[in-house]
Amino acid sequence: MASFVVLGHRADASGDFKLDDICGGAGRLDILVRCVNSAFFLSHGIRKENEAHLLLLGGRDAPRVVTFVGSEIRYLNPDERSTASLIRNALLKDPGPTPTKSSPGVYAAGKSLDALLDELAGKHSFVLLAEDGVDVREADIPENPCFILGDNQDPTEEEIRAISGYPFTKVSVGPLSLHADHCITVLLNEMDRRAPR
Amino acid sequence: MASFVVLGHRADASGDFKLDDICGGAGRLDILVRCVNSAFFLSHGIRKENEAHLLLLGGRDAPRVVTFVGSEIRYLNPDERSTASLIRNALLKDPGPTPTKSSPGVYAAGKSLDALLDELAGKHSFVLLAEDGVDVREADIPENPCFILGDNQDPTEEEIRAISGYPFTKVSVGPLSLHADHCITVLLNEMDRRAPR
């Protein structure tokens, strides 16, 4: 079981964007949808035990969190456009602080990083992806990890301060700095190898 | 330096498809464009030493090969839509047997798997991705590997026969069967770890 928090620093929380323009107008939402793909897809199924929380910090309705719950998901496809559409539909429901379901396994809520971390801290141990972290192949991965990743920008000082309010460890995925979705693939491959079978 | 051949069993070689419909009308071209992303993107740059050859086996103009050459690429973005657009532009040039350049580092040619393998065999050692292969962490990876992957369908018997005309090894990426683009990410992470620095 793994959870992921992806910090979408400019990702448009309003839902007021075109599906043809998820890189530009939607504030690099493309990065977040690729993270959803990496967090859930296997060749012949869905990683039902995983969850992904996309923090959208751009636009007039920020901050909002769109959450994908693997055990409930039904209409997830691997391509970017259809996942972006699920996210847009969730945002257009104009969610309040209580999570609103827009599709099986897809929820949105008006929520800050602080509130999200507070909610997750009871169930998960935080692991920050960082170039100066312990190589994931050598790292202790806690039982219910919640991996925190930036989008195309590293976490800000303020975000690091928020995370530092909880116990957390740092891991890296190897000698080169990778896109967030590629990091998730490498992390899950390591976890797959350690999982009892 | 790594090369990738991705077998797009239904991918439309004509270029006659809509960018909004790369999963459906374009015959799962979405899988191939994600493989391009995985083969080339680092956080802060392009893997210039890599090449990707997409074999498009669907539609009236099949077979065709669209090739991305890392050392020459200039207008590659990580999102699916823009890469699909590069592929469509390459196909719409109506390429013959000689590779036609449509954008820096992007070429198309009317070419079969046999012809592609014949061309690559001189420079590369073939490595087939297969669930019964040697785990990549334990495998000998040749100096100039050319990894061969299926899209959402395994290589056909005929394709395996074509590959068997050359020396090749088989590797797997771990205990679970992954999407082709995720396999590429895991392979390159292993190669990154072995590369002299």
Image (cartoon, coloured by chain):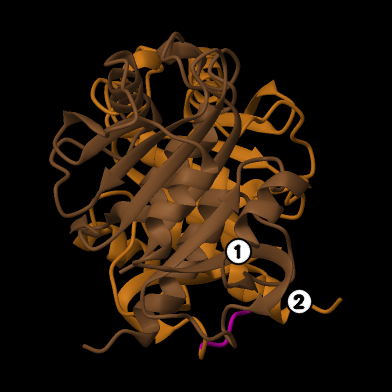
Chain colours: A orange, B brown
Is A111 above or below relative to B81?
below
* In magenta stretch: residue A142: yes
Residue A192 can be seen, yes or no: yes
Is B40 above or below relative to B108?
below
Task: Place residue A182 in its image quadrant.
Answer: bottom left
Answer yes or no: do the residues labelled 2 and 1 have beta carbons within 8 Å?
no
Q: Which residue is mark 1?
A: B128
Q: Where is residue B3 drawn, in percent x and y? A: 38, 59
Front-lying residue, A181 or A164: A181
Q: Residue at x 18, y 58 (%)?
A: B44
Q: Where is residue B182 drawn, in percent x and y? A: 54, 55
Q: Residue at x 45, y 14 (%)?
A: B14
Residue A147 can be seen, yes or no: no
Front-lying residue, B90 or A127: B90
Question: What amino acid type should be assigned to the residue bearing mark 2?
Answer: Ala
Say whether residue B171 is left or right of residue A6.
Answer: right
Say whether residue A23 is left or right of residue A13.
Answer: left
Task: Place residue A193 in its image quadrant.
Answer: bottom right
Callout 2: 10 Å neighbours few (<14), some, many (20+)? Answer: few
Q: Which residue is mark 2?
A: A195
Task: Place residue B2 in its image quadrant.
Answer: bottom left
Magenta highlight range: A139-143
Mark 2 to mark 1: distance in Å?
A: 25 Å
* In magenta stretch: residue B57: no
Callout 1: 10 Å neighbours few (<14), some, many (20+)? Answer: many
